[in-house]
Amino acid sequence: MDSNEVIGAEAQATQENDVAGQESFAEMLEKSTTRKARLAPGEKVQARVVGISGEVVYIDLGGKSEGFIDIAEFRDDNGSISIKEGDQVEAHFVSVVDGAMKLTTLVRGHSTVKLAQIREAFESGTAVTGDVKREIKGGFEVSVDGVKCFCPFSQIDLKGGREGGLYVGSAFPFKVIEFKEGGRTLVLSRRVVLQEEKAAIVGRLKDSLQVGQEITGRVSSLQNFGAFVDIGGIEGLIPTSEISWAKANKPSDTLSVGQELTVRLISIDWERNRLTLSIKAMLPDPWEGLTERYPVGSKISGTIVRLTPFGAFVNLEPGIDGLIHLSNLGSSKRINHPKEVVETGQTIEAYVIAVDQQSKKISLSVQPKAEPRKVTYPVAGEVIDGVIEKVLPFGIFVKIADGVTGLVPNSEMGTPRGTDHTKTFMPGSSMQVLVIDVDAENAKVTLSRKGVIQKEEEADLKRYRESSAKGSKSESGLSSFGELLKARLEEKELRN
């Protein structure tokens, strides 16, 4: 090929390349124009950031087509820019401004970038930081990087929280528990975060806590049954009985919310996450050395704190109560209840008559302990003269010897059923009785009036039989039995 042919071929190739280049540019222009024509206001696109200049972020819309977004949409409250070249963004076409396509990441006032971050947190289960703005119906409005979210009352704390003042104006970590309708419904929970934190704390404490260990904590709440103490993310309970050796009416008498305490761990139940604590276990046992402080025979002074049917309890010092038994209240008359001679709150002097340190019991008496008096009890079958002490619905108490009183049950009175004994038998009057049972150990004697009558009748019958054998009659013309019978009838009339 000569030089002219080479030149011609090169010129032809150059022309073809120019045409090809013109066609490629035309195609790109057509594509760009077509792309512009396809976008409608509000249409969503995925685009890559290709540049940031001044107040504008440029994005690639494909080919040689570009759009721009106001940089303010990527600026946080501190003025920092949260976007860089190469990031992918989701944007919506707004309009053409001065020949350039303007887009926005804001959907219903929220940045799609920020919504994407919240959606990612929802899907991954990671926490987001939210500012509690105000209390609204059913819960709280929470702002997450400018996006409005909702936290129900039940999800703001472990025990719920309707005390808005405790939360409004504060920032907390939250879990996104609902992300619906493209971000229109955003529900947060602080409770889930706290539960996870508590579970982690419990896991660590399981490895370190032991019964008998001393722990420092702070009183978190007071209830009638005890005080809850926060020992570092988990609460333990001090029952009312473990607050002090002294009897406490309610925890608020001695403790206050926020008070710092050192307590002893006395029980662990990890199945129910229950820890039982004690202040009392940290204090000296007042029963130690009791026999030295209160020797038998010593005189003490205390306050009556409780009355029971069997006696009166006297407080000697915090945690130490002594009992004055009903029989040791010092009255010469029979006492049915301590309230007949003493009352709660009364200061009383008494004597120590017995101390049982092991059983934690101390017995008192208003009189010094005397040598036990030997009581002679009657023998069953004896007929004894006694004095009526008291007439009660179930029977009559009769004093039959010094220090010995027996009971005649109604069934042993020998009177017709339903008889009102209060009208017939008066306290202080005499009564002859038959001893039918003696329980010296428990100082109980059972008597019978009916038995005396039966014995008399048996004696009369015996005398009659003896006189009948002799065939004798009295001067009145009556037989001996007739006279006896007449005398018995007259005696019964006098008794009734």
Image (cartoon, grey):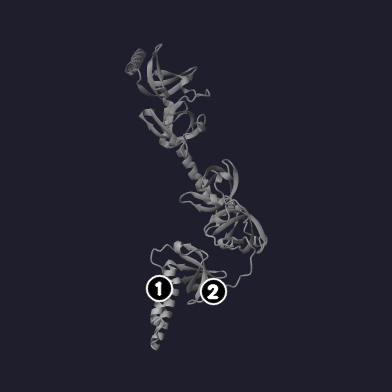
The answer to which of marks 1 and 2 sits earlier in the sequence is 2
Q: Is disc 1 surrounded by few (<14), some (14 to 19) or many (20+) residues within 10 Å?
A: few
Tell me residue 420's x, y (percent).
42, 62
- Residue under numbered circle 2: 377
Q: Residue furthest bottom?
A: 470
What residue type is disc 2 on? Tyr
Label pair 1/2, CB-CB below 8 angstroms: no
Tell me residue 322's x, y (percent).
60, 58
Q: Which mark is residue 303?
A: none
What residue type is disc 1 on? Leu
Q: Which mark is residue 489?
A: 1
Residue shown at 42% from the left, 75% from the top = 487
Residue shown at 57% from the left, 72% from the top = 375
Tell me residue 431's x, y (percent).
49, 70
- Rounded to the nearest angstrom, the CA distance separating label 1 from label 2 is 34 Å
Task: Specify whether 325 is left or right of 89.
Answer: right
Q: Which quadrant would residue 352 be assigned to in this image?
A: bottom right
Can see residue 420?
Answer: yes
Q: Nearer the viewer, residue 355 or 237?
A: 355
Q: Nearer the viewer, residue 59 or 29?
A: 59
Tell me residue 360's x, y (percent).
58, 60
The secondary element bearing badge 2 is classed as loop
How many numbered tags mark residues here?
2
Disc nearest the viewer among 1 and 2: 1
Is 370 located above or below residue 269 in the figure? Answer: below
